[in-house]
Image (spheres, rainbow, N blue to C red):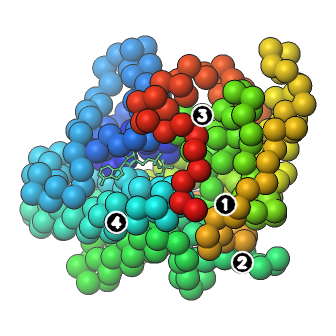
Amino acid sequence: MKILITGGSGFIGGCLVRKLINDYRFSIYNIDKYGYASDDTGIENILKEKKNINYSFFKLNLTEKNKLDDLVNSIAPDIIMHLAAESHVDRSIQTPGDFIESNIVGTYNLLEATRSYLRNRVQNSDKRFIFHHISTDEVFGSLGNTGKFNEETAYDPRSPYSASKASSDHLVRAYFHTYNLPCLITNCSNNFGPWQFPEKLIPLVITKAINNQPIPIYGDGSNIRDWLFVQDHVDALLLCALKGIPGETYCIGGYGEQTNKYIVNRICEIMDNEKSLPSNHSKLITYVQDRPGHDKRYAIDSTKITAELGWMPKYGFEKGLETTVKWYINNYSWCKKILEKSKYNGERIGI
Ligand SMILES: NC(=O)c1ccc[n+]([C@@H]2O[C@H](COP(=O)([O-])OP(=O)(O)OC[C@H]3O[C@@H](n4cnc5c(N)ncnc54)[C@H](O)[C@@H]3O)[C@@H](O)[C@H]2O)c1
């Protein structure tokens, strides 16, 4: 089978590509514009060890419609997993236009390229095809102290990032209903794990702590996210892509609701226990001005994907967090390299 991944050089896409190389026998095609958060070191490391892997990388921005049309047609995929997107809320506050271009126009272009490709394919193949759109729980807005998002929750996005992802979800659903394009959508909670660009909360905190720099917590730190270890997420994604039903949505949560304050303190504790590092990292914690429009709480009810596809997280929050903190300590040179390449220095964005 041929599987086309968009955004395979990013954090979640990279984890997905590595899993496919290690555990599956697909031909893998990765389309990525190779933006500031992209890095293929993890994929290249595995390719050096493995023989006879059918992996191809194409550096292309999804906004380049004609080139994308030609590429999708020439690859002729059986599965498309669409992860390419601008993904950082703070950056969407600073430069919303980039999110409109990549997340909305990029998704529209990919849907159009797929529609045109499928017109030829249906005449020559009766093999299953699926377009799997990877989205976020942020499209559902913000929860109070109780309740959880599920597949029936109404959309209520509140940042330029979540609004752009919501728009792309609506486009995907429209293509399913209007053109019978076999699509499914997954909406997942906040991911964490190795190889994540150090601007998102967990790797940012770890790299600040390693450098003995102030560790920022937005507002009073009481905001809650349902943290999902990236390898657990990738297992869920592959189940959906291979066994999910076209037209359906699957919500993927980590069974890992935590406040930001708890996460930051827990990272400090794990680092305090590392013999190679100084102790008392929590003295670096500094409360800073809150993010504008900061959603209070996200939580996902994963009943459907568990009941219908049999998914449960294998790592879970605590084991995933320990694995992640240790990975960043042992791979700090990678963080330095990617931060230098991107010219990002851990500064606050989007106030
Ligand atoms: N990280 C999370 O916590 C999280 C949570 C829920 C959903 N998601 C979704 O999962 C997907 C992947 O997220 P991530 O954390 O890996 O993001 P990431 O920023 O690490 O990677 C995204 C990748 O997409 C590429 N990309 C962006 N715009 C593109 C374009 N116009 N053309 C081609 N490539 C482009 C980037 O170069 C990058 O390599 C996104 O769609 C995101 O919305 C992420």
Residue 341 seen in render: yes
Quick one: SS at disc 1? loop
What amino acid type should be assigned to the residue bearing mark 4? Gly
Going from the N terminus, do you reach mark 3 or mark 2 first? 2
Going from the N terminus, do you reach mark 2 or mark 1 first? 2
Q: According to the image, label 4 marks what residue?
A: 97
Quick one: SS at disc 3? loop
Q: Residue at x 82, y 29 (%)?
A: 271
Left or right position of 144 against 177: right
C-alpha distance separating marks 3 and 2: 28 Å
Quick one: SS at disc 2? loop
C-alpha distance separating marks 2 and 1: 14 Å
Q: According to the image, label 1 marks what residue?
A: 253
Going from the N terminus, do you reach mark 1 or mark 4 first? 4
Left or right position of 69 against 282: left
Q: According to the image, label 3 marks what residue?
A: 194
